[in-house]
Amino acid sequence: MSGDDRASGAVAAPGEVVLERASRAFALRHERSRTLKEAALGRARAGRSWRSSARALDAVDLRIAPGEAVGVIGRNGAGKTSTLRCLAGIVPLDSGRAECGGRTVSLIELGAGFHDDFTGRENIYLNGALHGFDRTQMEARMEAIVEFSELGAFIDAPVKAYSSGMQLRLGFSIVAQLDADVMLIDEVLAVGDESFQRKCLARISERINDGATLVLVSHDPMAIERICRRVVVLEHGAVVFDGPVVAGLLFYHSLLGTERGASRSLRPADGSASEPGRIELTELDLRDADGASRRAFRPGEALRVELALRCATPTQRAVAALEVRDQRGERCFRTVATIGAVAGVVEVTFDVPRLALLGGDYDLAAGVFDQDAPPGALLDRVARFSVAPTGDGEGVADLRGRWSVRGRAQPAGEPVTESRAAEPDPRTPPARTARP
Amino acid sequence: MMVQGAAVTAAPYTAAGLGPGVDSRRRMLQYHFLFEQMVRRELRQKYKGSALGVLWYLVNPIVLMGAYALVFSVLLRVADVPDYPLFLLVGLIVWVFFAQALLAAAPSLVANAALIRRVRFPREAIPASVATVQLVTFLVMLALVTPVALAVRGTLGPALALLPVIVALLFCLVLGLSLAASVLHAHFRDVEPVLAAALLPWFFLTPIFLPIEDMPGASEHPLLRDALQWGNPIAPFVVAVRDVLFAGSAPTLGHMGYLAAIGIGALAIGVELFRRMEGELAVVL
């Protein structure tokens, strides 16, 4: 029976996530529950070898260290949500081991178990209780949850009066404030308005920095790209890729590409080139003013990004994209340039006369693709570089402003001394999108 | 005190090969708040928008009492029991608690499928909270009926001290059967209709209208009498509560031992069945 495959000794450390040879099959049947008659006739189960079953997880091995943020992607039915459910302990495994160390919270499906007649506040208590928190722990977190949710007076209205966006806010706010060791989040970030999404991502990054582990299942490559450093691609219940996010998304993209090949032929042939050229980014380098390859810069220095792309079959609509991200994965800057017709090898540069970034580590992601390619998941190369910290200014963007004070005679209170030049607010990209 | 007993017994949460092996006692403490929230939720659902609230649960046995008193005492004249309506009422509240709890618990897991599919928590909290809410209503009725019985029958005496023990064991029986019914119904959806169909004949086979010794045919069929008295798990509880409240006499030691065996046995079976069958809940729901 299911109770026998207990953990083989080792208990996962807080924040650690372990799947060991984890397998799980589901019966393929129209009705999910049996009737007594079926059971009496002995048609239903013999062990768990269902007549027709689908393997949702097939001997999956996965080990996630505390503080890691891992994105799980894959096509529909690849086993993403099943993986999450097994990790959360909602669905038992047929064999193998699934374990999350420490306290685990799960946000699976929208409105994670809200009670319609309860107010938002009461649902916060109930949800906290479901996750194993007690009253005092929940009371301590209540204000933070209510504030994060931005629900205002609605927090004391029954949840049935909420829109789906409001339910999402509430659900996410609870999970975000429960400070668990492991967060298991499924898809839900796709809902909700842009600003709240951003706030969620920021909050998740914060939790990860504090040492929490995240397993995020999503169809949205952008969300994964922003938060996760590591990606697991599932296909038919097996891990087919496990590695850095950029390579993983590219891999996933190629998986999807095989599917799209069929639908493309349905479109009226545009021009003579039936198959748009496959463009490859072969080189990505950062150079200083003297043309030397470097990975560390000072604010205000000149920087040149060099790309080399290769195109096996000529294409008319090559596009190059660059993106700079801060440590939390937030985009600081993105630019897309139309390169046009490409055949063979082409070198492209992007010149930054004065680096307007403040001190810190950054990722420069670059990609080239055909204009017809779908958006997202296209920045397949990353170069990490750092900018030396300087005395003034915090954040990401160096606005190069200058303070000046007039009428110094009367000490008019406390003069503003802190440079607010560079709020790390991604809504206002620090630089204009340039088109070289 | 009884309510806490429920939390304790509902606690053995087995993770079927999953998760950290937190010992059940700590888990029980940890999820105490969950249990409280679930009970609150059940209460809210039950009395949502009803002006009389918990009093409605008194209406049912009182109406039944009136009807049966009329039929058996006035019309058929088979019941030769003093204070017959009270005799009926004492048996009825025990039966109503038993039947209502089972009927409410059976579909409870299915009704909470959304929770079960999304979050991991000790699922026995669901049927246990349903049974506990029924216990609360039962205790309210008991609190109303007891003074009446003591006044009318003059049964205030040492036997009354056994009442909490009997009620605790009755709750064990109800909780055990609730756990079993809910998890069975989740796997086999005909459990609830079967239960609903069985409860009516079961009611008539339970000695609620008459003490079983007073039934005219009982002496001719001693085997049948014994089967009805001891083979029906709820019958000894009805008889014991009536002994204490209505007759003012303590059940025999053997009777009490039998109650303990039924109550604890049913609870053990219910907990074990739940443990074995809860693993697949998120899949079958």
Image (cartoon, rainbow, N blue to C red):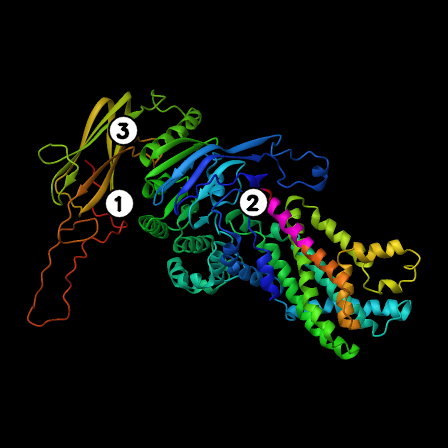
Which kind of residue does numbered mark 3 sit on? Ala
Residue A227 location, quadrant: top left
Q: Is residue B104 left or right of residue A136?
A: right
Circle 1 — which element?
loop
- Vertical placement of residue A92 versus B142, above or below: above
Residue that numbered label 3 is attached to: A318
Q: Is residue A289 left or right of residue B249?
A: left
**What residue occupies the far front of the structure in this picture?**
B253
Find the magenta span and give its range.
Answer: B265-283
Which kind of residue does numbered mark 2 sit on? Ala
Distance of mark 1 from mark 2, alpha carbons? 38 Å
Tell me whether marks 1 and 2 sit on the same chain.
Answer: no
Distance of mark 2 from mark 3, alpha carbons? 48 Å
Circle 3 — which element?
strand
Q: 10 Å neighbourhood of mark 2: few (<14), some, or many (≥20)?
A: many
Q: Position of residue B118 (x, y in %)?
A: 51, 48
Residue that numbered label 2 is attached to: B282
Asked whether the beta carbons under mark 1 and mark 2 sit within 8 Å of each other, the answer is: no
Q: Is residue B214 left or right of residue B98?
A: right
| Predominant secondary structure, magenta span | helix
Circle 2 — which element?
helix
Tell me whether marks 3 and 1 sit on the same chain.
Answer: yes
Residue that numbered label 1 is attached to: A327
Distance of mark 3 from mark 1, alpha carbons? 29 Å
